[in-house]
Amino acid sequence: MAAPRNIVILTGAGISAESGIDTFRAEGGLWEQHRIEDVATPEGFERDPDLVLNFYDMRRAALATVAPNPAHEALARLDAEFDGELLIVTQNVDDLHERAGARRVLHMHGELKSALCRICERRTPFEGTMRQRPACPMCESRSLRPDVVWFGEMPYEMDRIYAALRAADLFVSIGTSGAVYPAAGFVRDAREMGAHTLELNLERSEGSHWFHESRQGRAGELVPAWVEEILR
Ligand code: BJW
């Protein structure tokens, strides 16, 4: 294809795997350790808030023990040096894209280091643990929940994402299984709207056949090589 001028990148848990963060659907991954219904649905939170707050408190604390890997660093370099339009849409709730230096990042499934107040519905930066029920800094009610998007909830900034997909001439999906919608449908949306589509993943994902091109391997190797091609 001609040199791209407008790139949308979708990242998933696979890009953070080499940093030591568990993916969801791998053998031994998060969904083998915890039931989705218990920790990633509003109903699970209603049933047992302590279990859910603990699950996210532990994952938030673990962020201090990990660091960005060469794939995050390569995307941060792309963000700094690519002078066309770029949007990194991540499904990840970690902060490794930002810690690598990327700025044009959108967290469609929320962030571990953010809290959502169930009373005033405002989002605030959050560090520490929620199991002691800290007060919301905006309305002071003790009703904070993790600011993450659970099954059945609407992901963040869908209008902005679809606008970016409409304008994209290249869509790149990195380290995601293609099992969760609406993110899994972005490749079809982008392709129908005229973008070239590329997958970089350890293995072929569920929606691999929708991509014009699919490369298999570790993100820490594939992503720096692809960024080099774009910036050449
Ligand atoms: C490597 C690697 C290395 C490993 N290098 N690669 C029936 C049909 C269609 C849709 C639905 C349906 N029934 C219900 C739905 C909707 C539902 C859904 O999709 N369900 C599916 C199970 C079918 N979706 C929702 O409810 C969403 N909301 C919604 O749809 O709202 C309505 C709406 C309508 C229209 C438009 C817009 C909205 C909300 C979904 C919320 C997902 N939440 C979670 C938890 C977030 C908080 C948390 O982190 O705990 O998000 S679930 C979990 O899955 C997390 C992830 O972001 C998400 C995706 O996972 P991901 O990133 O792909 O990880 P894995 O583990 O699956 O894959 C990792 C990949 O990396 C693998 O392929 C590896 O091979 C690879 N890899 N190491 C490169 N080193």
Image (cartoon, rainbow, N blue to C red):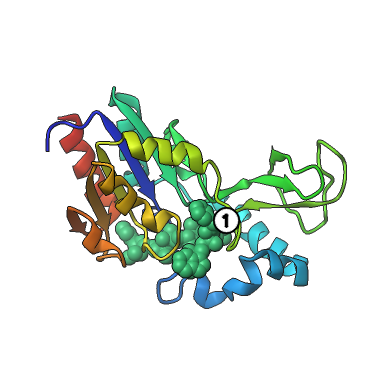
* Residue 215, x across and y down, in percent: 19, 56
Q: Quadrant of the N terminus?
A: top left
Q: Residue furthest top?
A: 83
* Residue 9, x across and y down, in percent: 34, 43
Q: Residue furthest front?
A: 192
Residue nearest the observer in this picture, 134 or 87: 87
Is residue 22 in view from this perspective? Answer: no
Q: Residue at x 81, y 36 (%)?
A: 138
* Residue that label 1 marks: 62
* Residue type highlighted by circle 1: Ala
Q: Is residue 222 left or right of residue 159?
A: left
SS of the residue under disc 1: helix
Q: Residue at x 37, y 47 (%)?
A: 10
* Residue 171, x across and y down, in percent: 28, 44
Q: Residue at x 73, y 40 (%)?
A: 122
Q: Is residue 126 left or right of residue 81?
A: right
Q: Residue at x 82, y 56 (%)?
A: 132
Pointer 1: residues within 10 angstroms few (<14), some, or many (20+)? few
Q: Quadrant of the C terminus?
A: top left
